[in-house]
């Protein structure tokens, strides 16, 4: 009756690795168990993000514009370029258990080695290299954009960001995270996610549940989230086993990764004081 929805997905290029019946059963279970949701007060909650929600949220770190371009103020023309990606290279910017890397030879997170971009008057190519962006919470590398590399370094020697990534995890299952939570929320995924500087805004979709006394107690109406990526990733309590998730390509010719595949492997996360700002009419 338009009161609940369920979703599950993964984007392996090898279809034999996709368990369609299991995905369908999971989506149906989420739909059935999220019927007749109740409204709760927005605020800060201990929050368990399933792997898909983590990708929807953390995946925005993997755009070139969020890490930014090193260099002169002319390359820092908006809030993106004034964020910690510039001034904190070599410093710890998130929980020390987190490492984020990309390697085109990783058999589970592989991607094309070259991106070719055609503009009206010229064409250029970015060659991807293995990179560790975050190592044990420390910012280790910034991706150089083509125009910065050519204009300031004199050659296209950048370390571009493909958008594909692998994020380290732990060994705590979602069931164990729930059991250790006195009161909190469980999130399936986020939708309509957008960035303002390092603030991430989006709404929950396809299953949001209230946890009380270590158990899921009821389905909750969807809410809008407005949260700092750095704040959240410094408030991680527990990490689970990483897994491959659905990481869609931004649409349109001017999409961030220009239609290259961008696979992602991420863990579930339990985060304290995660900010839910208002109710959403989304189902």
Image (tube, helix red, strand yellow):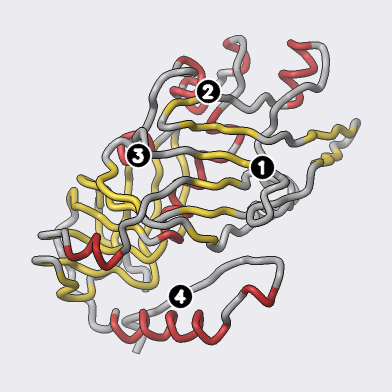
- Crowd around label 2: few <14 · some 14–19 · many ≥20 (10 Å): many
The span from disc 1 to disc 3 (Cα, nearest Å) is 22 Å
Point out residue 230 in the picture as x, y percentages from the top left corner. 36, 34
Q: Residue 103 carries which label?
A: 1
First in sequence, mark 1 or 4: give its number: 4
Q: Earlier in the sequence, mark 4 or mark 2?
A: 4
Q: Position of residue 193 (x, y in %)?
A: 46, 52
31 and 177: which one is in front? 177
The residue wearing badge 2 is 81
Quarter occupied by the C terminus: bottom left
- Label 4 to label 3: alpha-carbon separation: 25 Å
Q: What element carries label 2?
A: helix
| Dot 1 or dot 2, earlier in sequence | 2
> Distance from label 2 to label 3 (Cα)?
20 Å
x, y percent for residue 141: 57, 25
Q: Name the residue under label 3.
A: 233
């Amino acid at each position: 009756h338009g009161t609940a929805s369920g979703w599950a997905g993964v984007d392996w290029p090898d279809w034999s690795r996709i368990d369609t019946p299991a995905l369908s059963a999971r989506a149906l279970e989420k739909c059935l168990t999220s019927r007749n949701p109740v409204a709760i007060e927005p605020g800060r909650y201990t929050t368990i993000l399933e792997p898909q929600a983590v990708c929807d949220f953390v995946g925005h770190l993997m755009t070139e514009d969020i890490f930014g371009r090193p260099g002169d103020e002319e390359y820092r023309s908006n809030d993106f370029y004034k964020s910690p990606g510039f001034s904190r290279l070599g410093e710890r910017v998130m929980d020390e258990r987190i490492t984020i890397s990309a390697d085109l030879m990783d058999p589970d997170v592989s991607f094309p080695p070259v991106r070719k971009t055609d503009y009206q008057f010229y064409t250029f190519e970015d060659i991807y290299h293995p990179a560790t962006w975050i190592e044990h919470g420390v910012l280790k590398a910034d991706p150089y954009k083509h125009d910065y590399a050519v204009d300031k370094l004199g050659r296209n020697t950048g370390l571009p960001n493909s958008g594909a990534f692998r994020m380290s995890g732990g060994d705590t299952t979602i069931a164990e995270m729930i059991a250790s939570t006195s009161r909190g929320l469980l999130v399936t995924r986020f939708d309509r996610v957008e960035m303002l500087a390092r603030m991430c805004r989006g709404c929950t979709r396809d299953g949001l549940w209230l946890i009380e006394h270590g158990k899921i107690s009821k389905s909750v109406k969807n809410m809008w989230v407005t949260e700092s990526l750095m704040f959240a990733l410094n408030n991680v309590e527990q990490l689970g086993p990483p897994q491959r998730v659905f990481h869609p390509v931004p649409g349109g010719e001017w999409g961030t990764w220009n239609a290259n595949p961008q696979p992602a492997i991420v863990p579930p996360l339990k985060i304290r004081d995660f900010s839910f700002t208002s109710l959403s009419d989304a189902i």
